[in-house]
Amino acid sequence: MENLVVTPTPLFHFFVLLLGAALGSFFTVVVYRVPLGMSIVKPPSHCPECKNRLKWHDNLPMVGWLLLRGKCRFCKKPIPVRYPLIEFGCGLALAAAAWCGMPPGRGADAAAVEWTLRLMLLTALAFPVVVTDLRSMLIPDVAVIPGIALALLASLLPGGLEWRSALAGALAASVALWAFGRLMSKILGRDAMGFGDVKLVAFFGALMGAKFALMSVLLGALFGTVATLPLAKLRKGEIPFGPFLYLGAVVVWFQGERLWNLYLAYATGG
Ligand SMILES: [Zn+2]
């Protein structure tokens, strides 16, 4: 197992692109339905204009829209081009994540495969989390809970983050953010943070372990605070925190080790 090396071909990245597009199609439904309290499976996809139920092949990511030439097959009303674009964007993002960790033609060992799977999870959830939080101040459980489960499962694979570290990361990050939220609520005198944010950082913890997850909570809180100060004057009411946490997690994913070394050098006066 230790020396297992796979060499991905471009076909692999193409399949990941299709997987990402299918996820994008599903997440479009999530972003729209979850804030309305609707089921994500019932009713099945239908035209918002004439309510006719779509055929299964109309639902194929990207392809369905192209085959229909952007019009409902029943009422001929246009289907917004943002749907195939979102699907394509999600597909491209997931394929880019796979390419980043497992470029074609180069052998990937178990640790590289595990790293890539975790980066793909981080990438896949960005769209539903950030968009739903921006639009509706909600972080959808239907994305984050499977995300946590898959991240913990990935840690069972050999060669990368250990399952104990993943579990400890999920716990440490969620407790830290929960405590920060309680503190902010006391200071502001109102509920400053939703439980969705706590589940989101549990996901980051399961992906990165305690040290990096705590760093991304800190960074996310920093981004959130800096952006909120001018925004709070412009925009009354709640500020979504999920996008800032996500930004913090992505920065730490790629630059965490460097930031940590900078901090160590600073802390020891080097
Ligand atoms: Zn229609």
Image (tube, rainbow, N blue to C red):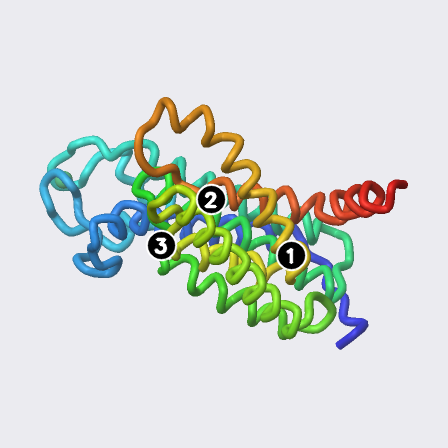
Whole-Å distance between the Cαs marked 3 and 2? 17 Å
Residue 7 sits in which quadrant?
bottom right
Please say if the residues under marks 3 and 2 sit with CB atoms less than 8 Å apart.
no
Q: Mark 3: which amino acid? A: Pro
* Mark 3 or mark 1, earlier in chain: 1
Where residue 8 appears, as percent x and y from the top left, is: 68, 56
As drawn, the label of residue 51 is none
User: Where is ligand 1, by quadrant?
Assistant: top left
Q: Mark 1: which amino acid? A: Thr
Q: Circle 2 sits on which residue?
A: 90
Q: Circle 1 sits on which residue?
A: 116
| Quadrant placement of the C terminus | top right
* Mark 3 or mark 2, earlier in chain: 2
Closer to the camera in the image, 42 or 244: 244
Mark 1 Cβ and ligand 1 under 8 Å apart: no
**Badge 3 element:** loop
**Badge 2 element:** helix
Q: Circle 3 sits on which residue?
A: 140
| Quadrant placement of the N terminus | bottom right
Q: What residue is rendered at 47% in x and 41% in y?
A: 243
Q: Mark 2: which amino acid? A: Cys
